[in-house]
Amino acid sequence: MNAGFRASLHRYFARRVRDASEIDDMVQQVFERLLKRGDVSNVEHLGGYVFQTASSVFTDHLRRRRTRHADAHDEFDERNHGDVDFSPEHVLLERERLARATAVLLELPERTRVIFVLRRLEGMKYLDIAARLGISVSAVEKHMERAVARLAESVEPE
């Protein structure tokens, strides 16, 4: 039975999933379910039963992907993330840098801090910030320069 259905199941899943690396696993899951069921010799329409099991495997696959938000994840790319140091020492140093940066932001004049947060954290454009605060774009630029310079001098890596 295994060889007779393997190629058909492979094609069945290949038409339904984007990631080809998942196909063989799904085919294997169909055979696992059939083995768990036990004797299938008394099944009248074995082909229909196998593909009904395949449909169930596919439905479970979709449910898992949706539950785990699989489409919202990025694959690990060594070129982009491979050199990140997760050692306890590095994590502690970065937390300390973050605490220093937070302290510096809190020491900034309120308007400078608000402008920095609107630009860097909220992603607003200078023109929108200026309109929101009722100041010129040039003033927004100067506040940003002050905030960035103050952060840079106080949070230099050691």
Image: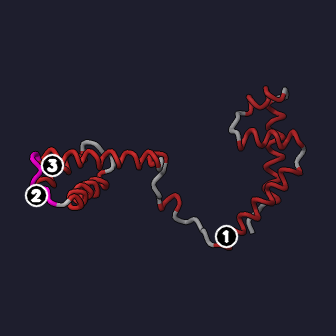
Region rendered in magenta: 39-45
Q: Which sits in the foreground, 98 or 158?
A: 98
Query: What amino acid is at disc 3?
Result: Ser
Mark-to-mark CA distance, 3 and 2: 12 Å
Left/right of residue 120 with respect to residue 146 in the rendered view: left
The crowd level at tag 1 (other Cα within 10 Å; few <14, some 14-19, many 20+) is: few
- The answer to which of marks 3 and 1 sits earlier in the sequence is 3
Give the secondary structure at mark 3: helix
Picture coordinates of residue 60, whole percent (x, y): 35, 48
Residue that badge 3 annotates:
8
Mark-to-mark CA distance, 3 and 1: 51 Å
Residue that badge 1 annotates:
90
Q: Residue at x 26, y 44 (%)?
A: 55
- Principal secondary structure, stretch drawn in magenta: loop
Q: In this view, does 10 lie above or below 79?
A: above
The crowd level at tag 3 (other Cα within 10 Å; few <14, some 14-19, many 20+) is: few
Residue that badge 2 annotates:
1
Q: Nearer the viewer, mark 3 or mark 2?
A: 2
Left/right of residue 12 with respect to residue 137 in the rendered view: left
